Image: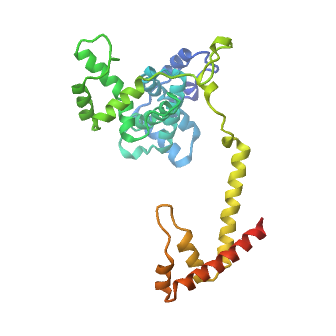
Amino acid sequence: MQHALTLAQFSLPSPTGSIEAYIQAANRVPLLTLDEEQELSRRLRDDGDREAARMLVMSHLRLVIAVARGYLGYGLPHADLIQEGSVGLMKAVKRFDPERGVRLVSFALHWIKAEIHEYILKNWRLVKLATTKAQRKLFFNLRSMKAALAKEANAEHGFASLAPDEVASVARQLGVKPEEVVEMETRMGGMDISLEPLSDDDDDHYSPAAYLAADISVEPSIQLERKEHDRLQDTGLRDALAELDDRSRTIVQRRWLVDDDESGATLHELASEYGVSAERIRQIEAKAMQKMKGVLAARM
């Protein structure tokens, strides 16, 4: 096999000049036979052969290009979609096991789509449209399903709102709730608005950004200062608790250091557990708090 394949066959011209030239060059890279694919995969798996990995990736770039072409309807650059899909392909090549009895093309398809999906969800809108599994399913299927329904109804396009029976049909096919279909259709149909003015003309300087109040709390210096303050507080609290005896520490923790969704123990509850009066628990707590304040003050 090494005599049949040469590294020159698995190289793209650089620079390619355009996305069209890149696609043409990628399509000229030879496909691998089953034996060649398995041999290269074993060389990568057993010896970490980088040249074998490159051959596997290069021979499957046409698959990435074909998959990326199916997502051009989201208005993102074709080159970026191919780039993200190529990342998925490289991940697949790294994880591929030739002994599983499947071809790399089948194994890589999932990784390529997953990487492209992630890129689209992060970049198609400023506000993420799909975060749950059901929303992702809707996001990547609703557009094509609307087009199919419009075609069946002999409509001119698939951009009109779905009728109630069509909403029910889509929800049933995708296994989601009808209200989720309506919500995703509404969100996908909304238009993006630039936060900043798109030109330097005075008349165009009205944009959402002009009406947003500046939030100084997000400035890096303030965030770092807040994080350092929280860290010192957390460390100081641990040190202060360490200065207490076991009983005092437990009383303070159960009274005041509980989760937000829980309520602290009462003086009477603790008094019952320790077999003393509620007043005695209060005295122990007051003394412990005073000692902790002294430790914290010494750290400032």
* 58 on left or right of 181: right
Q: Residue at x 41, y 23 (%)?
A: 189
Q: Which residue is drawn at 43% across and 35% down?
A: 130
State the image coordinates of residue 19 (x, y, percent, origin top left).
Answer: 55, 17
Q: Nearer the viewer, residue 70 or 153?
A: 153
Q: Can see residue 184?
A: yes
Q: Which of 231 and 138 is in front in this view?
A: 231
State the image coordinates of residue 172 (x, y, percent, origin top left).
Answer: 23, 34
Q: Residue at x 32, y 17 (%)?
A: 158
Q: Nearer the viewer, residue 125 or 106?
A: 125
Q: In this view, does 57 lie above or below 256?
A: above
Q: Which residue is drawn at 74% across and 45% down?
A: 221
> Residue at the front extreme?
279
State the image coordinates of residue 74 (x, y, percent, origin top left).
Answer: 45, 23
State the image coordinates of residue 282 (x, y, percent, origin top left).
Answer: 58, 80
* 86 on left or right of 15: left
Q: Tally the marks.
A: 0
Q: Which colour scheme is used?
A: rainbow
Q: Can see residue 1?
A: no
Q: In this view, does 154 lie above or below 128?
A: above
Q: Is residue 113 above or below residue 191?
A: below
Q: Which of 33 and 65 is in front in this view?
A: 65
Residue 101: name its quadrant. Answer: top left
Residue 212: name its quadrant. Answer: top right
* 173 on left or right of 121: left
Q: In which quarter of the image is the C terminus?
A: bottom right
* 174 on left or right of 28: left
